[in-house]
Amino acid sequence: MNSCVIGLQWGDEGKGKIVDILAENSDIVVRYSGGANAGHTVVVGDTKFKLHLLPSGSVRPGTTCVIANGVAVDPQVLLEEIETLGQQDITLNGRLFISGNAHLVMDYHKKEDQLREESLGKNKLGTTVRGIGPCYSDKVGRSYAVRMDDLADLENLKVKLQAIVDYKNKVFSALYDAVPISADELFDKCKVYSEKLSPFRTNTTQFLHKAIADGKSILFEGAQGSLLDLDHGTFPFVTSSNSSSLGMPAGCGVPAKTVDKFIGVIKAYTTRVGAGPFPAEQDNDIGQYIRDRGQEYGTTTGRPRRCGWFDAVPVSYAITIGAIDCIALMHLDTLSGLKELNICKAYEIDGEQTRFFPTNAAQLSRATAVYETVPGWEEEITEVSDFNDLPENAQNYVCRVEEMTGKPVTMIGVGPKRSQTIFR
């Protein structure tokens, strides 16, 4: 069976844990979108792995890992992750494959990202300042793009980098009066990247199609969340790639029809990082309670996440556009201790009630959440391993989420560890 794991909210849903669990029965795990702005956390025993580019299946020694063409690869971050796993006696030699068509995040991309955000002031988008947006911009612009395959021809790369850096420095100077970047220093870094990453470079599209023909089980790992999708999310407060399941085919060159099951991951509540409208947000004691219990601080940036009640409106939208088959509901344990819970079942916009999610940020900013109140539970549930052993109100909450979204909840997270998962 081939599966695809997709976040159905604004990211940080717990995809890393689900991918790690499913990777046990998968031959190959494929990361196909986003860049080091994504942070997937995997907990193995008492060890916590924070991954930004490597597929979450990489912590399982027998799993083959692919970084496909749709990923914006920061070579420095990738090498640091490979080294970190190596310190844990987890080697990727012979089982990590990186697309030669994947675009590289360079130093000037990060600088451009930072300068642009600073110049926007209060109107900034709230990016992670990891250079992902500028990298994808150069990908679309083509003239100044650098890909993994360019590391194979250092002589031509040196000429290309000089032209790119000359252009970028003119822009930085004219728009931001910024200190220029050295093309020679950047090229010296690229020589190291070439030496250390070349053994992993391959044609991943060809590799994956051969694996499909050979009957291998493939797990596709999405990054960020569906509501951050460049085309179908809350624009302009989105990421720079297609982070819904719609980005999977383009991101790795494999048709969507080869996927047997699309698994949507949600939290039992809602979080968002950075700017943008958030109708169910609780900027109050409830939001802080969720933040503290759920440890809602960014894996990539450490920023506190905005927290609110579960919102069925955007989740139902993400299910619709993503052809989601079933749901993994994470962080149910975070809600323990609350006597009452609210679920957003609809929006009121300009005096009219709707259950369809408006991705237009201006329209969404006028939306008022329409809540349904349900009883909570006092008991801690982190040791529960059977659905029937959950408090009755916790069971009812899960069932109500199923009713509102129209999809079965087949996995429930009650803690960060692999073992803290209820299967239904």
Image (tube, rainbow, N blue to C red):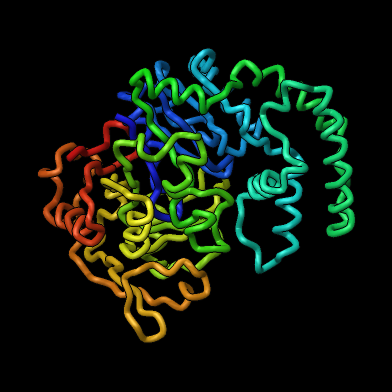
| x, y percent for residue 298 | 51, 48
Residue 295: x and y in percent read: 42, 48
- Residue drawn at x 33%, y 54% is 319
Q: Where the C terminus falls, by quadrant?
A: top left
Q: Which quarter of the figure has residue 42?
A: top left
Q: Residue at x 72, y 24 (%)?
A: 151
Q: Residue at x 28, y 69 (%)?
A: 345
Residue lying at the far bottom of the rendered structure: 351
Is 399 situated left or right of 360 in this image? Answer: left
Residue 372 in the image: state x and y as whole percent. 23, 71
Percent position of residue 115, x then y: 76, 55
Left-right relation of 255 to 338:
right
Camera-side residue of 336 and 8: 8
Residue at 49 percent of width and 17 percent of height: 95
Is 66 on the left or on the right of 44, as rendered?
right
Q: Identify whether 3 is placed above or below 132.
A: above
- Residue 335 visible to the viewer: yes
User: Looking at the image, can residue 284 be seen?
Assistant: no
Foreground residue among 347 and 273: 347
Q: Quadrant of residue 46?
A: top left
Quarter of the image with the N terminus is: top left
Is 64 located above or below residue 253 in the figure?
Answer: above
How many numbered marks are there? 0
